[in-house]
Image (cartoon, grey):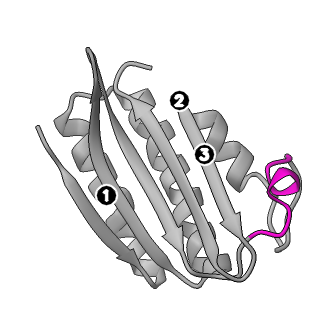
Amino acid sequence: MMIKENMAIQQERDLIFCRNRVKEVAGKIGMGLVNQTKLITATSELARNMLIYGGGGIMRLEIITRGKLEGIQLTFEDKGPGIADVDKAMQDGFTTGRTLGMGLPGAKRLVNEFSIQSTPGKGTTVKILKWKNG
C-alpha cells in the first residue's frame, strides 16, 4: 500500500482531521491499538506545537517499508520562528509556553525514530516514524 499525502495545519480543527487520518491509515496497515495510540498522541503533540509555536504548517504522512518492517512516517514542517536551543527544548519540563513541557521529549518516547531540525527565523521540521509492530 502506498500512501503519501500532505495536510495543512492552520487552525484547531485541522488537528482533529490530522489525528483521525493518522488513525485511519494506522488501522489500514494493521497497526495495533497500543501503537496507534502512541502514534496519535505524538501526532497530536507535534501538530499542536506547530500550530501554537510555528504559526501552522504542513504534516506529511507516508507509509514506509524497510524490509519486512512497515510503518508510518510523519513530517511536521513550519516556517515559524524556529527553536533557539533544540537540546534544551528536548529536555523534560522545558517550555516557552504555559504547558507541562512534555511535547517534544514526550513525542520522542512514543515513536521508534525521531529527528528535529530547526533554524531560528526560518522554521522547524520534526520527523517521526512508528513501526506497525514496534
Residue linked to disc 1:
20
Looking at the picture, does residue 121 appear above or below residue 30? below
Q: Distance between the residues labelled 3 and 2?
A: 10 Å
Residue drawn at 59 percent across, 58 percent down: 45
In the depicted view, which residue is nearer to us: 77 or 38?
A: 77
The answer to whether residue 91 is left or right of residue 68 is right
Give, as a three-letter code, the residue at label 1. Answer: Asn
Of mark 1 and mark 3, the one earlier in the sequence is 1
Q: In this view, does 50 lie to the left or right of 57?
A: right
* Quarter of the figure that contains the N terminus: top left
Q: Name the residue under label 2.
A: 112
To which quarter of the image does residue 75 belong? bottom left
Residue pictured at 69% horizontal, 44% vertical: 106
Residue lying farthest to the left in this orientation: 1
Residue drawn at 82 percent across, 57 percent down: 89
Which image quadrant for residue 118? bottom right
Disc 2 marks a residue whose amino acid type is Asn
Looking at the image, which residue is at 38% across and 58% down? 19
Front disc: 1 or 3:
3
Instruction: Tell whether position 88 is magenta.
Output: yes
Magenta stretch: give its range: 83-91
Compute the Cα span from label 1 to label 3: 23 Å
Q: What element carries label 3?
A: strand
First reached walking from the N terminus: tag 1 or tag 2: 1
Q: Give the crowd class for mark 1: few <14, some 14-19, many >=20 residues within 10 Å.
A: few
Q: Which of 87 and 92 is in front in this view?
A: 87
Image coordinates for residue 61, horizontal then vertical, percent:
32, 54
Instruction: State the residue position of label 3.
Output: 115
Question: Who is closer to the viewer here, 33 or 79?
Answer: 79
Q: Are marks 1 and 2 in contact (CB under 8 Å)?
A: no
Disc 1/disc 2 C-alpha distance (Å) = 21 Å
